[in-house]
Amino acid sequence: MRVRTTIAALTAAAILMPQAALAADAGAPSGAAAPPPDSQFQKVTLNDNPGEPMDLAVLPDSRVLHTTRPGEVWLHDPKTGLNTLAARLDVYQHDEEGLQSIALGPGFGKGSKKDDWIYLYYSPPLDTPVDDPATPDVNEGDAPFTGTPEDFAPFKGLIRLSRYRWTGSTIDLRTEQQILDVPVDRGICCHVGGDIVFDAAGNLYLSTGDDTNPFFSDGFTPIDERADRNPAFDAQRSSGNTNDLRGKILRIKPRDNGSYSIPHGNLFRPGTKNTRPEIYAMGLRNPFRIELNRRTGELYVGDYSPDQQQANPQRGPSGTGKWTTIRRAGNYGWPYCATARLPYVDYDFGTGASGATFDCAAPVNESPHNTGLRRLPPVTQPDVWYSYGASAEFPALGTGGIGPMGGPAYDFDPADTRGPRAVAWPKYYDGVPLFYEWTRDYVKAMFDRGQRIESVLPSIVFDNPMDMEFGPDGALYVLEYGDGFFSENPDAQLARIDFTGHTGNRTPIPAAQASVTGGLAPLTVAFTSTGTSDPDGDRLRYAWDFDADGRIDSRSPSASFTYRENGLYQATLKVTDDAGMSASTSVRIVIGNAVPVVELVSPVAGQPFRFGDLIEFEVRVTDDQPVNCANVAVNYILGHDDHGHPQTTARGCTGSIQTTVPSGHDPENDELTGVFVATYTDPGTGDLPGLTGSTEVVLQPTS
């Protein structure tokens, strides 16, 4: 996890949003009940140092696990307010790969501890080539765009679905049961993420991206079949392939020994030639977030869109994002159709000639990279689809980028509304699935499968929402990525959104400051809670845990503590009102090791830049330990609107990165940037783990 180079006081751990809700979106039927006002909801920060957040899972006791792409799993405990490391995996990181999703097993917390499994979807390092800092002019970690099968073979990798035993506060990585490997082509972007959900019968659903480079297809469908081209430019080999696990939603039933069986009702019967029986839904591009309504069995899916903003009769429709409810197995069209009504046009990447329009009622996969059936199932129409501009069918979605996320459906329980600390959402949202938009920073309620769409808490900030889930207390838990790229962004956080309408009581807002945030042991630090408040004016109780050992060190608003051993400490302040509502905040204290300061000497903001340029980089690291340039990583990201597409990772204090021309984009008119993120992790000292610093430079392209 990135540690900020300047650690100041952390304030506003709980943020009250008092503004009244906006009216329901246009199109809601007259006489429909109005949603509760935003003033009856409160956003409470649980962890505002979440690393590069990826996915979350709420435990039955309302503790929360969340993953970071570099391989960490963090645990938030609401009883103590502490955020502690539950596991750290060694993962392969190039473009989007790393640690992705987390889920609790279906029997978790329901009886025997033997059923307390934690499921993770991650990229094991394997022996995949990585960049060698000793050769600054060559990036060995990048897969070639053209070549022979022998050239591409070293980059054949996988993403693994495994499960592990839960110890009560950590994940025991020694207990790994490897369940399923999804083959991928490494060293090249994009769409390798996945999500894990379970239904009421214990079936596991895993979403997978198409693992296909979209940047040389003019923003249309990537179906490059040229013999010398890296297969990663052809989504027919993955999403359109009945014999491949990518670009799918898989459905399996895990067994006690870590193997799995195939549930009845998947798309292809076991034993069907040239198919994978695990496939439940196919023809998906990047179904980054899915959720399942265990009460109804409905699966909610958000599928990302290509970047082309204008339709072309010679190529196909503009970029189209989708949200849909899946009740039975089906094919959703990619890469032949954006929807059942929006087909693409066949295109020869060698000659530049357009062919026939694909038949969405009877798609045919004739790619030389196809290992599955030639004739595919007909394309199923999604419930909701939209592009960059205003949607005639779904005007409530507005305009902007396209980052659809399948959110959870609320399961209302009247028992959750009783008691002085009730935070459960109101019955108004019972059974209603939520849809959230990563690029547009909003949440919508999808009534009647999207036929009626309402804004949810429009006055509350959802800053690039990465994942959300209703907890056992009926509150909505949200993981926010914040504004930035592939590091811990300043606005990233794990939060909980409470409904306060049952009690009228709101959670306190803690604030904590430290006189110093690091030094050599023994070090005495003075702490104060100045700025702490309660929205209702309640009397507050204070509890400090300065060394995160779970024991209260002071109950005074201000106190001091002497750190006698080296370490990385989260000095946590928990404040509680008379009704028992509490919130926490923390200050990071580093003893015996300084956080490295990372600077990009070059490139610098404002430097002239054109896509396609070779960019020389130089990174300066200042640390209290000898700097090893082999631990410096520089990521190049194509920024597009409010999101980014990672292109490559180089290593070393100096080197060069070849930028690419973003096909399908107009650098003069589209919101494009070149983003360079440099990170460095020092070796640590003694028992203190290595600390990480990072910096980011955004280059604006010139015409």
Image (spheres, rainbow, N blue to C red):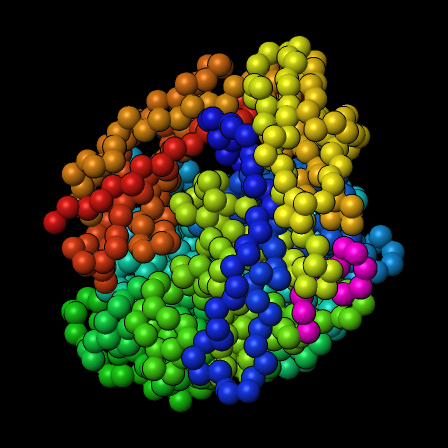
Q: Is residue 270 above or below residue 654?
A: below
Q: Nearer the viewer, residue 480 or 676?
A: 480
- Left or right, 356 with respect to 500, comes to left
Q: Which residues are magenta?
A: 417-427
Q: Residue at x 56, y 69 (%)?
A: 434
Q: Is residue 241 visible?
A: no
Quadrant housing residue 112:
bottom right
Q: Is residue 344 magenta?
A: no
Quadrant housing residue 341:
bottom left
Q: Where does the image place residue 256, in percent across and percent down from the top left?
A: 79, 60
Q: Is residue 12 visible?
A: yes
Q: Where does the image place residue 526, in percent across and percent down from the top left?
A: 64, 19
Q: Nearer the viewer, residue 187 or 484?
A: 484
Q: Residue at x 78, y 49 (%)?
A: 579
Quadrant housing residue 132:
top left
Q: Is residue 97 above or below residue 242?
A: above
Q: Residue furthest left?
A: 703
Q: Give the number of callouts.
A: 0
Q: Where does the image place residue 142, in percent across and percent down from the top left?
A: 35, 44
Q: Is residue 418 magenta?
A: yes
